[in-house]
Image (cartoon, coloured by chain):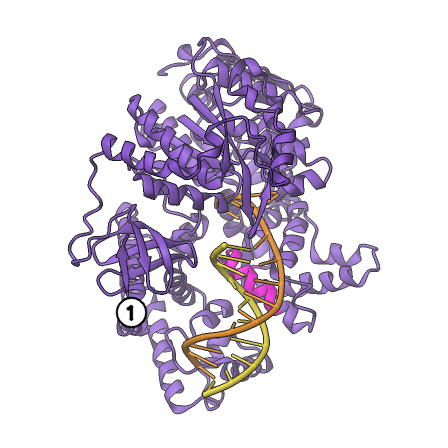
Chain colours: A purple, B orange, C yellow
Amino acid sequence: METVNDLNPMQREAALHTEGPLLVLAGAGSGKTGTMTHRIAHLIKDKGVDPYNIFAVTFTNKAAAEMRDRVETLVGEGVRMWILTFHAACLRILRKHADLIGYRTDFTIYDPADQKVVAKNCVRELGLDEKRYSPAYVLSVIGKCKERGKTAADFEAEPSGTMQHDSLAEIYRLYEETLKGNNAMDFGDLIMRTVFLLERHPEALAEYTRRFRYIMVDEYQDTDPMQYRFIRLLAGGYGNICVVGDDDQCIYEWRGADITNILNFERDFPGAKVIKLEQNYRSNANILGGANSVIANNAGRKGKALWTEREGGDKIIFERTYDEREEGRYVAREIERCVGDGYSYRDIAVLYRTNAQSRAFEEAFSVARVPYRVLGGVRYYDRKEIKDMLAYMRLVQNQSDDLALVRVINEPRRGVGEKSLAKVRAYADASGQSLFEAFSDEDALMSLSARARAAVISMELAIRRYSDGDHNIQEIYDGLMTDTGYVAALEEQNTVEAERRVENLLEFKSVIMEYEESEPGITLSEFMEKIALISDIDNHDREEDAVALMTLHSAKGLEFPVVFMPGMEDGLFPSGRAIEESGRIDEERRLCYVGMTRAKERLYMIRAQERTLYGRRDMTMESRFLREIDREYLEGAEKIGSDTTDYFHGAMGGGDGFASAEVFRPFDLIGGIRKEVARAHKREDGGGMSGGAPFAAGDKVRHNTFGDGVVLESDGSVVTVMFGSVGKKRLAAGIAPMEKI
DNA sequence: TGACATATCATAATC
DNA sequence: TGATATGTCA
């Protein structure tokens, strides 16, 4: 798409409609991003608008980066335009006007792990029941408040009278005091405090309303009340606000998204133009028809009917399996079939409702030698060693950050335990100093042992050494790694685990080098900011030929030629909680719709008749969503809705109600798959031969203590094995008492 | 202070 | 089931 003329009539209308409020209802696969980027290009190239006057907001860094890329392709390099996530945009505003709301401009951003520590401390300090006020619960309450702009004072003032409410109010207040005292903000603050700032300081607001003549919001259905207020404030200037979204893809209500924002757009922005993008360029007619028939069961929709010019294509395949293990084997087998048909592994995705479901697929894929990668899970920046080093860097940047200090004061071990810390903390509180200051105070240090004292002093010297502003980030990072003794301590451990941590630290160094190369002269603060807002180095786009395993939620915005949706069972999908609490099925249904519309050519939906969930093995009920799919789009429809008695018989121990023969062959399948795969696949096994013990991914092994397992990964010296008894374990090949079976 | 045993709890996850 | 958090012991 080089020019607007390549857009379809509706897309073109959206791209050319630039003045006044505009709601673009963009169905799945309707060319949303192309439309938006052309709209921006049109503003700049045809209407002569200075990019400086345009503001586009997204939810994820990935979406922002993609939009920037595509706009730059259309209008040329280096567009000085705000294409930012909500948080990045708010942060930019806050940094500039921090003083207006009583913050120093160098405030730190607390991530959920930091928040958890603070919440825990608050509850403890207030002497409240730590079970009843778990960090997760406390933070969800505080988070919900912040999404709606409810301050600690507001919350406290609410008439409620219950002890619970009073305690929460106390916690919230202390939490806020702690953050403020540490010159820190959490993610919720970034939005809420920006809104407060703009509402209370018209002169600051005017700066932005004057600047932003055109505003665009991506994924509008996901906005929460504070984000909505933020947008409204900015649109209060020129009123040229274009929001793009799809009410049918609102799947984040549980984290604050308010679907009424998109449903009420026309009411909130009078004179709004509404354009529906309903032509789908992604899925075949059967997949689309099936998805449409499911979503049609939701009430209160804006009402879109996706259509496609493509006719026919594969029907949606439904299969019923005996349990989750057979489900895994079935999917592995079908994947090989797709590969035989010419698909690559990277064309295929398995989308499940809960992360726990990945296990059965990991096992089955390892046995069948299907290359895969699990997306989501442990984030790079969540790794302990990275967080530790970042805490040191935070201290270099902001020595009032008590949280960072607590994190690393005894990391590596300096002999400063709970007791010593408590003493110094008391001293700091009494003298009104930060912990870092207290730890450099001679009087306070006297409460430590001589050895601890020396270690702490040397750590402080290191931090002060790099706070002088004369070092670049690489020097700071390198210096801290050695001068704090962090890496030395890891190396002393001499374990596989520690070795991997050191490798991660070195990998992080290369991240720093890349940043400094692409942005020469970048300061520590700027760097820390980037890190705080980018939770992961984008590992999804790596061109690895492997099947993608991920949750339905993280699949939003992606597409794959072949999609598997396993676990189509009531209680799992829709989730048990959604079934219990009325009114929550709609969102699950939207999630189902999102999943189905990820598929371009082939879509499989699978249900296991038995499943182990939370250690309990139970008969399952088929997902209600399956019955909502029009049968004309389905292959295997006869297996739906016909087994009410089947699992009844099954539950009675009869085992004879199962109509399908496949269902009852869970055991002979494994051999079948093996042979099939061995034939289809002459791939090498990751080179696990060097250490003498030739373990390769997919091997079945027996360990003296852990019992039987399957090798997931092997790099020669380290073998990762999934054991039935103890789960995933990393073992040293050649040393571990383990053999192939 | 650190290693081990026991208790607990359980969707999804952006920034 | 299985990860994680807490408590107990040396």
Q: Residues within 10 Å of mark 1 (few under 14, many from 20)?
A: many
Q: Is residue A256 visible?
A: no
Element carrying mark 1: helix
Question: What is the span of residues highlighted in magenta in the rendered image?
Answer: A103-121
**Kind of residue indicated by mark 1:** Val
Q: Quadrant of residue B9?
A: bottom right
Note whether A511 is above or below A477 in the view shown: above
Q: Quadrant of residue A499?
A: bottom left
State how many labels appear: 1
Closest to the observer, A206 or A639: A639
Q: At 60% across and 41% down in the image, what residue appears?
A: A653
A675 lies left or right of A88:
left
Q: Where residue A674 sits: x, y (%)?
A: 30, 37
Q: Which quadrant is home to the N terminus of chain A?
A: top left
Q: Is residue A408 visible?
A: yes
Note whether A572 is above or below A699 in the view shown: above
A652 lies left or right of A694:
right
User: Which chain's residue wears label 1?
Assistant: A
Is residue A397 rendered magenta in the image?
A: no
Q: Which residue is mark 1?
A: A487
Q: Where residue A87 sits: x, y (%)?
A: 52, 45
